[in-house]
Image (spheres, helix red, strand yellow):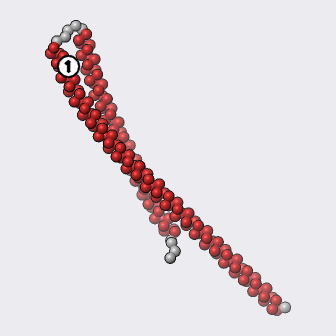
Amino acid sequence: MSIDWTLLVEVRERRRTSALEAVARERRAAAESLAAWQQAQAQQQQQVNAKLQHWQATAGALSGGECQVAHLRQAGAWSGALDAQIAQAGEAAAQAGQVHAQRQQVLDASRLKLRAASGELEAAQQMQQRTRTAARRQREQRLDAATEEAAAQAWLSRRARA
């Protein structure tokens, strides 16, 4: 039973092409998830900055000398609302980070499959080349043997005539 190396190489090339396409898809998905994660982190930072600005404005108002308990209560309540927004933004950022980590794992797995498919293709191509080289060497040996046989027959024929 002989192996059709050309067919095997074609199959392995298709497998490698498919793996390459999967890596490209997963790379795009990982880039999108990274962008979403970065955006979620930026939104969380905006919330933190809003709280910082709120308290800076409150401190500025209090430095004028007018301090009313109602204003402090209102500032505290608003600060609590900002804390809730910061927590929500933090959770969204954490979830986006988890999604990105999962996408990155899928991308890494796709890259491993691509490396394996590329290795299998290279091995099949090398075996195909070895088989071709061996077949060419065998043809050359047969031709050499046939040439030697023809030369021997011609020599015997000339000798028999002489």
Tell me the quarter of the picture where residue 72 sits. top left
Check the image and report above or below for 101 versus 11.
above
| Place of residue 98 in the rendered image (x, y in percent of width and height, measured from the top left) | 32, 42
- Residue closest to the eye, 155 or 123: 123
| Place of residue 21 in the rendered image (x, y in percent of width and height, measured from the top left) | 42, 54
| Place of residue 39 in the rendered image (x, y in percent of width and height, measured from the top left) | 33, 35
Q: Is residue 156 left or right of residue 5?
A: right
Task: Kindly identify the amino acid type of the residue bearing the numbered disc 1.
Answer: Ala
Check the image and report above or below for 80 versus 15.
above
Q: Residue at x 70, y 77 (%)?
A: 144
**Image quarter in which the C terminus is found:** bottom right
Q: Is residue 145 left or right of residue 117?
A: right
Q: Residue at x 20, y 27 (%)?
A: 81
Check the image and report above or below for 137 versus 17.
below
Tell me the quarter of the picture where residue 55 sits. top left
Q: Residue at x 78, y 88 (%)?
A: 156
Q: Which residue is mark 1?
A: 75
- Disc 1 crowd rating (10 Å Cα; few below 14, some 14-19, many 20+) is some
| Place of residue 129 in the rendered image (x, y in percent of width and height, measured from the top left) | 58, 65
Residue ranking furthest to the right: 162
Secondary structure under the numbered disc 1 in the rendered image = helix
Q: Residue at x 52, y 64 (%)?
A: 124
Residue ranking furthest to the left: 70
Check the image and report above or below for 139 versus 120.
below
Residue ranking furthest to the top: 65
Tell me the quarter of the picture where residue 128 sits. bottom right
Q: Is residue 68 visible?
A: yes
Q: Is residue 20 visible?
A: no
Count of numbered circles on the image: 1
Q: Is residue 37 left or right of residue 141?
A: left
